[in-house]
Image (tube, rainbow, N blue to C red):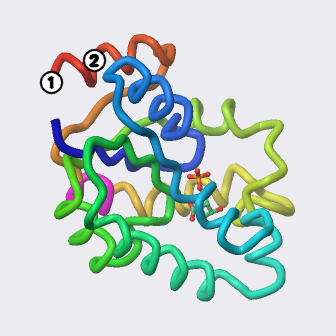
Amino acid sequence: MNNIVLIGFMGSGKTTVGKKLAEELEIEWLDIDTEIEKREGKPISEIFAEKGELYFREIETGYIRSLLSVQKTVISTGGGIVLKEENVALLKEIGMVIFLHADFSQIIERLKEDTTRPLLQGENREEKVMNLLEQRDPSYLSAADIIIQTTGKGVNNVVEEIISFF
Ligand code: S3P
């Protein structure tokens, strides 16, 4: 089995599903945001606050390039990874791209206690989510080899559904 790349909006389950999926398939798991945090020695929120989103996006693309040699790994990505065409092309080269789709209300529910996502800080969280979803959904859809609906489903269900494709 080659690599599996999970894409989707913040709160769509890329990290939890990725970890469980790798466990079930007995292959490696890697979370791009966690790897970036390790490399930079600070949380994503601090990277954004100190160096800005553009800097983060450069690090993100650089990190994806380094994954071209990875094998038999489930890769969880950050929600903004599809913003650059270059990233999408690299991800498709790296593995099978699976879009974890969650609807607006599910995302709001899953992120309601979250304080870590820099793009959702401040007021009008719902409006921010709505705008970002509108901007990004077409990119998730066009990057995806497989689309999995996650709304109302538990992690195990989503993992089983993904495994059924292989
Ligand atoms: C981002 C999503 C985050 C993280 C960063 C930017 C985005 O990852 O990469 O805060 O632009 O949607 P998650 O999707 O894991 O929250």
Residue 133, how many percent across, how many down? 48, 55
Q: Main secondary structure of the magenta part?
A: helix
Q: Which residue is mark 2?
A: 161
Horizontal side of 1 relative to 158 (left or right) equals left
Q: Residue at x 78, y 63 (%)?
A: 43
Residue nearer the viewer, 105 or 2: 2
Ligand 1 quadrant in view: bottom right
Q: Secondary structure at mark 2?
A: helix
Q: Which residues are magenta?
A: 139-143
Magenta-drawn stretch contains 79: no
Where residue 108 sits, quadrant-wise, is top right
Which amino acid type is marked by label 2?
Answer: Glu
Where, quadrant-wise, is the C terminus in this rendering?
A: top left
Marks 2 and 1 in Cβ contact (< 8 Å): yes
62, above or below 64, in the image? below
Residue nearer the viewer, 152 or 68: 68
Horizontal side of 43 relative to 29 (left or right) equals right
Horizontal side of 19 relative to 164 (left or right) equals right
Which amino acid type is marked by label 1?
Answer: Phe
Ligand 1 within 8 angstroms of badge 2 C-beta = no
Where residue 69 sits, quadrant-wise, is bottom left
Is residue 3 visible to us here?
A: yes
Q: Residue at x 85, y 60 (%)?
A: 123
Where, quadrant-wise, is the N terminus in this rendering?
A: top left
